[in-house]
Image (cartoon, rainbow, N blue to C red):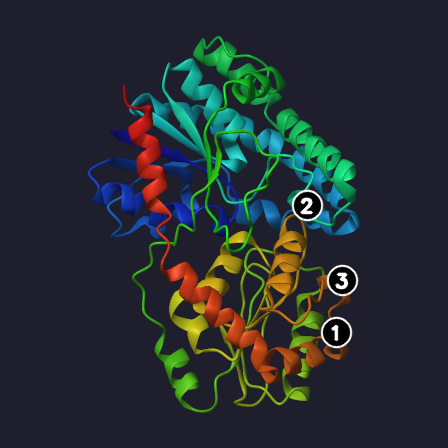
């Protein structure tokens, strides 16, 4: 089949689909990944074709509106702000996604673009299914991940999940209008389309493991947990990183991925102070936050490095608890300290603590040398966190997240 995978967002919203796409391609499918042009290098050597779409997520996150997300102190406030930002981006991407789908037999839509991908597939009379990296459907069992994941009780959790779904629907109102007026598609409103697809049990596969998030018992049929989709990445570690690893005991990796921070210089200084107070060496990743580590030979600053190669060789990993980095840490079997910044970071951070791989979470707004240093000492000094991390990693190594997607594609074939 000619398969198009649609996604949008940061690197963590894209990279898992390169590995999934490579797995589908090895099974004989012709796979195209449609997402921001910034991420085309991620598909190199994977056998996956690339279809670039507009919008530069790095530029958006560093814009005044993107940095304004830090002004919101609640999950709902952040969600409303990002939904407002996403409306124009969704409309801008619409034409390119339609173009990608016109040459396909099936549309696979990531959670970030599911309403639009589903509507495009319907307008072109193509089958579709969802590929989600977070549990987005409402449930009474835990708080809505995009609101931070804090439990509000069974009723509050369900209502919070419905509020998120409603906010996501509104993101795509203008995009649906564009499908009707520019492309002549008889598509319904986002909310009407979602309700119809829910009644029809539109299939959604989730790219995480039940060892990490068990499937909620109150989910409808058709919502399944496939297992992790590991990114395609054939890079090696830079020479300076190999030299640093060889020069002393395993270091701590610190990186906030695609998250931005209000004051990178101050935060970087606090991180370095914490590492030194805990008596640990550190590899600090610059990332989109612009972190830097200056000083003696006990810390270095790096750019983009392959997590799958580096994380297993660390004493611990400090990260922003995005879905992609959380998956990489679990795969590596490394103890961790999540530093949730926004959206689903709080949800994944809580899961890591509950699983026993992290001693605690240190939210960005509370991160100082005084809070991070004791967490580092616990993560690296209490063997139970590494033991639990390695146990989970062994279990994840035996799972195959691609196989359920292949089976789902087979079911879509007449």
In this figure, which residue is indicated by the disc labeled 2? Answer: 142
Left/right of residue 250 with respect to residue 66 in the rendered view: left
In this view of the protein, can residue 294 be seen by the observer?
A: no
What is the C-alpha distance between the residues marked 1 and 2? 29 Å
Judging from the image, what secondary structure is the residue with disc 3 in? helix
Q: Bin the neighbour count of mark 1 within 10 Å (Cα to Cα): few under 14, some 14-19, many 20 and up.
A: some
Residue at 60% across, 68% down: 356
What is the C-alpha distance between the residues marked 2 and 3? 23 Å
In this figure, which residue is indicated by the disc labeled 1? Answer: 368
State the residue in front, 347 or 50: 347
Place of residue 145 in the rendered image (x, y in percent of width and height, measured from the top left) = 65, 45
Left/right of residue 2 with respect to residue 339 in the rendered view: left
Residue at 64% across, 47% down: 63
Q: Say which quadrant the N terminus sits in.
A: top left
In which image quadrant can residue 280 be found? bottom right
In this figure, which residue is indicated by the disc labeled 3? Answer: 365
What is the C-alpha distance between the residues marked 3 and 1? 9 Å
Q: Is residue 260 above or below residue 368?
A: above
Judging from the image, what secondary structure is the residue with disc 2 in? loop
Q: Residue furthest left?
A: 28
Lower position in the chain sequence, tag 1 or tag 2: 2
Q: Bin the neighbour count of mark 2 within 10 Å (Cα to Cα): few under 14, some 14-19, many 20 and up.
A: many
Residue at 28% across, 47% down: 22
Place of residue 129 in the rendered image (x, y in percent of width and height, measured from the top left) = 42, 29
Lower position in the chain sequence, tag 2 or tag 3: 2
């Amino acid at each position: 089949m000619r398969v198009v995978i649609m996604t949008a967002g940061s690197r963590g919203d894209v990279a898992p689909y390169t590995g999934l796409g490579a797995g589908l391609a090895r099974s004989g499918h012709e796979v195209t990944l449609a997402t921001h042009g910034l991420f085309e290098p991620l598909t190199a050597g994977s056998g996956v074709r690339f279809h670039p779409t507009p919008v530069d997520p790095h530029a958006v996150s560093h814009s005044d509106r993107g940095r304004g997300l830090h002004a919101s102190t609640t999950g709902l406030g952040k969600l409303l702000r990002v939904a407002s930002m996403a409306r124009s981006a969704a409309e801008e991407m619409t034409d390119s996604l339609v173009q990608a789908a016109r040459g396909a037999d099936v549309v696979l839509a990531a959670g970030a673009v599911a309403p639009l991908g589903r509507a495009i597939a319907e307008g072109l009379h193509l089958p579709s299914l969802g590929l989600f990296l977070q549990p987005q459907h409402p449930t009474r069992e835990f708080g809505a991940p995009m609101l931070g994941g804090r439990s509000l009780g069974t009723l509050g959790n369900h209502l919070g999940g419905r509020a998120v779904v409603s906010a996501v629907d509104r993101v795509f109102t203008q995009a649906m209008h564009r499908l009707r007026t520019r492309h002549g598609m008889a598509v319904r409103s986002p909310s009407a389309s979602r309700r119809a697809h829910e009644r029809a049990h539109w299939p959604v596969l989730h790219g995480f493991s039940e060892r990490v998030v068990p499937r909620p018992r109150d989910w409808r049929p058709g919502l399944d947990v496939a297992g992790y989709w590991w990114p395609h990445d054939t890079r090696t570690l830079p020479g300076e990183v190999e030299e640093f690893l060889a020069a002393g005991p395993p270091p701590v990796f610190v990186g906030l991925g695609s998250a931005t921070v209000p004051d990178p210089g101050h935060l970087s200084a606090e991180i370095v102070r914490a590492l030194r107070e805990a008596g640990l060496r550190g590899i600090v990743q610059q990332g989109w936050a612009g972190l830097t580590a200056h000083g003696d030979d006990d810390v270095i600053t790096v750019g983009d490095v392959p997590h799958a190669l580096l994380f297993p060789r660390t004493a611990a990993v400090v990260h922003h608890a995005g879905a992609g980095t959380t998956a990489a840490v679990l795969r590596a079997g490394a103890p961790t300290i999540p530093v949730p910044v926004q959206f689903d970071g709080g949800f994944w951070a809580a899961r890591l603590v509950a699983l026993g791989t992290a001693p605690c979470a240190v939210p960005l707004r509370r991160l100082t040398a005084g809070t991070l240093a004791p967490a580092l000492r616990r993560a690296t000094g209490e063997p139970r966190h590494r033991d639990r991390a390695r146990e989970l990693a062994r279990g994840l190594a035996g799972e195959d997240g691609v196989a359920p997607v292949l089976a789902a594609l087979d079911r879509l074939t007449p």
